[in-house]
Image (cartoon, rainbow, N blue to C red):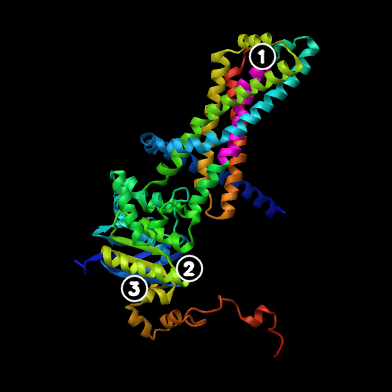
């Protein structure tokens, strides 16, 4: 059961009319795994999440989630499928007009007929899992960035999903909050037996907690492997990314004409 | 020179096409809101919550403005009417102006700037902070859950706010003309009573304010939902809500008045 494939991405292509974003992506994700998808800004990581959740349609290829091809589902079936998915947005995306408690209770109230007393118990259990049971009456504007993301995490596990997708969960957090979120992702994945996809460019924090890493660059998978393989990789792109080097396969300079030409120094002999 | 003229004409063409296209998008959105209103009717508590924000919180500006508009009408009306010795008709003048025109129109203009802009800003910010996307990911349709309740709350509040505006205006006129200037109280009320027709004046005013309510809230929710998800985008959308709905209110008012009161003595 633990090795069952939950998500299969097969030769996935996505392009806007003027620009190709993803080009022939193949991935396979099993239950109980934490998977990191890394790549520079604008490399198509978030697009991949949107394709998995069915928010956009692929140009060709497919994503299979729990045996169903996502883009072939009609609206109702897609909404049904999404109840098995959770998503943590970059800054939490909590409903600002609802308290922490009501945010976590939101999906339970929308999708189930559970009595209010049971919802209360469930919400407090979810909040306890992220360490914020004591703050259930707070409003989102009273939370720090790290706390807001923990509440959002509690909200996304409200209906015990099979998959949670994290869109840049480490952005803008202090070191303590950062490792709190990292450890929570690992712990919740293990204890709930779900799959987690973490889209991030925080190399060090994510390599500590993930089982497998995909690097996306220019719309293709540039490299993949376990954290150990990735750390030891001699592939130029991975090496540059892991060590944060300024220049390499990803150039420092935006493509431009010759520097001397730009400064009108061509005619002058050095 | 010729090139400039051609590009100018092209520009006008592009703008025209874009406006028509946007109108089409807005109409489709409006139909979608209507189709997805089931949730709002089944769970009426969602609408009641929004009624508080759009309706109840708009009351203060409506009440105060209504009072002042009525007082000004009374004062101006009295000044003119007394020249012809018919100052006792001032009650009729105040009531008819308010019930037929000023009540629905001014209340709708105030409603657009007080509640319409708030609705646009709220929905726009929910979009910018990915709250709408998060809702969609939780398999909850944001149009049914966020947009439709706000739309219906606006549509329901508008006629009541317009009525409140007219009532306060009539009272303001009474304060100025009867209490301060000394017009006969009996003739203020009795002339008003005999001149204002329920079906013809009050009902038509009510119908007007219903149209305005639909127009203002439809524009407000569309602009919010359609706003580019940036600070600049939301501020632009809020401005467009106020400007567009003000123009639509005045345009609609002319059309409705032409249909309702044309050829009446």
Can you identify the residue that label 2 sits on? A173
Q: Which label belongs to residue A210?
A: 3
Tell whether position B103 is magenta.
yes
Q: Position of residue A149 (x, y in %)?
A: 43, 61
Image quadrant holding the N terminus of chain A, namely: bottom left
Q: What residue is shown at x 44% (from left), y 48% (from top)?
A: A98
Question: In the rendering, at what x and y percent does residue A219 appear?
Answer: 41, 70
Direction left: furthest residue: A1
B199 and A257: which one is in front? Answer: B199
Q: Position of residue A148 (x, y in %)?
A: 45, 59
Q: Is residue A190 left or right of residue B110?
A: left
- Above/below status of A64 relative to A36: above
Label 3 CA crowd tier, 10 Å (few <14, some 14–19, many 20+):
many
Disc 1 to disc 2, how far (Cα)?
Answer: 67 Å
The residue shown at (58%, 25%) is B164
Can see residue A221? no
Chain that bears disc 3? A
Occupied quadrant, residue B199: top right
Q: Is residue A209 visible?
A: yes
Under circle 3, the secondary element is loop
The disc at residue B92 is 1
The residue range painted magenta reads: B91-116
Total number of numbered discs in the rendering = 3
Location of residue B211 in the rendering, given as x and y in whole percent from the top left corner: 53, 29
């Amino acid at each position: 059961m633990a090795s069952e494939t939950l998500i299969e991405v097969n030769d996935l292509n996505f392009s806007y009319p003027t620009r190709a974003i993803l080009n022939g992506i193949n991935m396979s994700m099993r239950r109980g795994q934490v998977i990191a998808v890394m790549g520079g800004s604008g490399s198509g990581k978030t697009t991949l999440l949107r394709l998995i959740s069915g928010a956009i349609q692929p140009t060709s290829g497919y994503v299979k989630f729990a045996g169903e091809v996502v883009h072939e589902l009609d609206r109702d079936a897609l909404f049904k499928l999404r109840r098995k998915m959770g998503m943590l947005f970059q800054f939490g995306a909590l409903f600002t007009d609802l308290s922490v408690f009501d945010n976590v209770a939101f999906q339970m109230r929308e999708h189930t007929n559970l009595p209010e007393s049971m919802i209360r118990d469930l919400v407090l259990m979810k909040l306890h899992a992220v360490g914020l049971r004591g703050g259930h009456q707070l409003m989102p504007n009273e939370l720090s960035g790290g706390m807001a993301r923990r509440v959002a995490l509690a909200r996304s596990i409200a209906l015990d999903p099979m998959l949670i997708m994290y869109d840049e969960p480490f952005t803008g957090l202090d070191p303590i909050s950062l490792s709190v979120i990292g450890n929570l992702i690992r712990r919740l994945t293990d204890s709930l037996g779900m799959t987690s996809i973490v889209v991030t460019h925080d190399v060090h924090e994510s390599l500590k907690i993930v089982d497998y890493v995909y690097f996306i660059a220019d719309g293709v998978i540039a490299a993949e492997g376990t954290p150990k393989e990735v750390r030891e990789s001699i592939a130029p792109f991975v090496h540059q990314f892991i060590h944060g080097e300024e220049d390499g396969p990803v150039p420092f300079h935006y493509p431009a004409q010759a520097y001397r030409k730009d400064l009108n120094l061509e005619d002058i002999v050095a | 020179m010729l090139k400039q003229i051609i590009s100018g004409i092209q520009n006008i063409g592009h703008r025209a096409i874009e406006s028509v296209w946007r109108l089409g998008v807005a109409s489709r959105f409006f139909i979608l809101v209507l189709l997805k209103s089931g949730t709002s009717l089944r769970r009426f508590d969602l609408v009641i919550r929004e009624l508080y924000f759009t309706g109840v919180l708009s009351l203060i500006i409506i009440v105060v403005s209504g009072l002042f508009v009525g007082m000004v009408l009374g004062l101006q009306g009295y000044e003119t009417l007394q020249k012809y010795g018919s100052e006792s008709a001032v009650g009729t003048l105040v009531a008819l102006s308010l019930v037929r025109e000023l009540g629905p129109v001014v209340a709708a203009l105030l409603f657009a700037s007080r509640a319409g802009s708030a609705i646009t800003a709220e929905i726009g910010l929910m979009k910018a902070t990915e709250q709408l996307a998060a809702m969609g990911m939780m398999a909850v349709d944001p149009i049914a859950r966020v947009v439709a309740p706000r739309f219906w709350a606006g549509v329901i509040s508008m006629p009541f706010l317009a009525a409140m505006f007219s009532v306060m205006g009539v009272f303001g006129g009474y304060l100025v003309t009867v209490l301060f200037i000394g017009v006969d109280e009996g003739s203020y009320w009795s002339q008003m009573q005999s001149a204002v027709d329920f079906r013809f004046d009050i009902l038509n005013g009510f119908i007007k304010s219903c149209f305005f309510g639909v127009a203002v809230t439809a524009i407000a929710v569309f602009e919010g939902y359609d706003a580019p998800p940036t600070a600049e985008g939301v501020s632009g959308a809020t401005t467009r809500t106020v400007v567009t709905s003000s123009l639509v209110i005045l345009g609609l008012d002319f059309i409705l008045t032409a249909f309702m009161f044309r050829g009446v003595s």
